[in-house]
Image: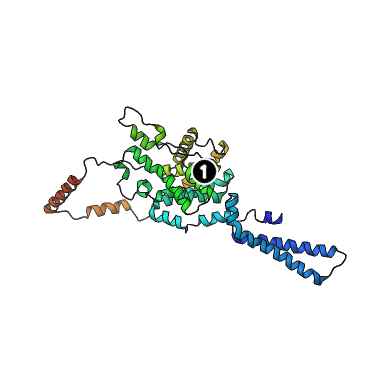
Amino acid sequence: ILASFSVIRCKKRHDIIKAGLNVSLANMVTVVIIDLLSDRFYPVELLPSVIFAVASGLSVSAIVSLLLPVLEHVFKVTTDITLLEFVDLDHPLMKKLMIHAPGTYHHSIIVGNLVDAASEEVGVNPLLARVSAYYHDIGKIKMPEYFVENQSSLVNKHDKLMPHLSCMVIISHVKDGLELADEYNLPIPIKSAITEHHGTNLISYFYSKAKEGQTDAPCEEDYRYPGPRPQTRITGLLMIADAVEAASRVLTDPTPSRVNGLIDKIVNQIFLDGQLDECELTLKDIHKIRKRFSYILTSILHKRIEYPGFDFNEKRKKEDTSAPKSSDTDKKSSAKDKAKRESNKPMDESGSNAFKS
C-alpha cells in the first residue's frame, strides 16, 4: 500500500528508488516492533531481519525500474517516466522535425504550450497533452515543402497540382506520421493524437477550389480526413489548439477582441461539424479552453512598442533612394534577361495563396 501511494506522482526513475527506500523503512520499523512485542527479544537475531527488510524494499524498486518498459507494453499503459523521454526537444525525431520542417516544429511547440495551459482546466495529464502536441504533425517531415509554414519562398507547390492531388498530399501526412511513430516506438497515446487531431475535418480550401468552374460538385468525402474523430479529451483539446494556432497566423491586427472572435469561430465550426461528439469534452470544458487559449494567444501575438530613435520604415526609404540609377545599357540587358525568363516559363504557371492544413 505504501509503495502504491509513493509512486502515484512518480515522474522520474529516481522516484521509484525513493519509493523503495520508503518501503525499506516501513519494513524495518515493522520488524523492530514485532520483535519488541515478542516474548523473547534478542538484538543479535534482530540484525539479519532488519537487513533483509531494507534489502527487500530496495531490490523491489530496482526490479520495477528494469521491468517498467515491459509492464507498460503488456498493460498498454504509458507512465510519466516514459513521457519525459519524449518531451525532451533533443529527441532524434524532434531534431529531425526542426531541421526538415522548422515551421511545423515551431507550430508544434506553440500548440504544446496551448494544450499544456488548458489541460489542467479540463482535468487531463499536462505532460501527455504536451508530448502529443509535439509529435502530432511529424508526418510533415517527409514532404515539408507542401505545407505553407515550411515554404520559405513565394513558390507554392500546390499551384501545379490538381485540387484532389493536393488534398491527397495534405492528408498523407497522417499516414506518414504513423509510420514514423512506429519507427521511433512512440507510445500508443501519441499515435492516437497523430490520427485523431484532424478527425474527419473538411479541407475546405481545396474543396472550394475543386468546385470552381465545375457543374457537378465534387464528393465532399474525398476532401475530408479519414479520421477517426477525437476519442479522448486530450485529442479533442489538441484538435482545437491545432486549428486555433494555425488560424491565428492570418490575423493582421491581433487585438484581444479579434483573438476572441477567431477562437469562437474555430471552436463553433469544430463543434457544429460533430468533431467533438465522440470525446469526453463538455460544454463547460470548451468554455474553459476558450478562455485559456485567448489569454495565451493574446500574449504570444502581442505588439512591441516602437524603439526610440529607430524608424525602420525611414531607413528602408533611404536605402531605396540611395540606390544607384542604372544606365541605358543596363536597362536594356535587364529587359532582355527578363524576356528570356518569361519565354522559358510554362504557359499554365500561375500563383495562388498558400494553404495551411
What residue is at 74 percent from the left and 62 percent from the top? 27
Location of the N terminus by quadrant is bottom right
Looking at the picture, how far across and down is residue 314, in whole percent?
Answer: 29, 52
- Residue 259 picture quarter: top left
What residue is at 46 percent from the left and 53 percent from the top? 183
What residue is at 54 percent from the left and 44 percent from the top? 234
| Residue ID for mark 1 | 235
Residue 30, relative to residue 332: is it above or below? Answer: below
Q: Say whether residue 250 is left or right of residue 196.
A: left
Query: Is 151 or 135 nearer to us in this picture?
Result: 135
Q: Say whether residue 231 is left or right of residue 92.
A: right
Looking at this view, name the residue that lies furthest to the bottom: 44
- Exactly how many numbered labels are in the figure? 1
Looking at the picture, how far across and down is residue 222, in whole percent?
Answer: 40, 35
Looking at the picture, how far across and down is residue 225, in whole percent?
Answer: 43, 39
Looking at the picture, how far across and down is residue 159, in whole percent?
Answer: 30, 42
**Disc 1: CA contacts within 10 A as few (<14), some (14-19) or many (>=20):** many
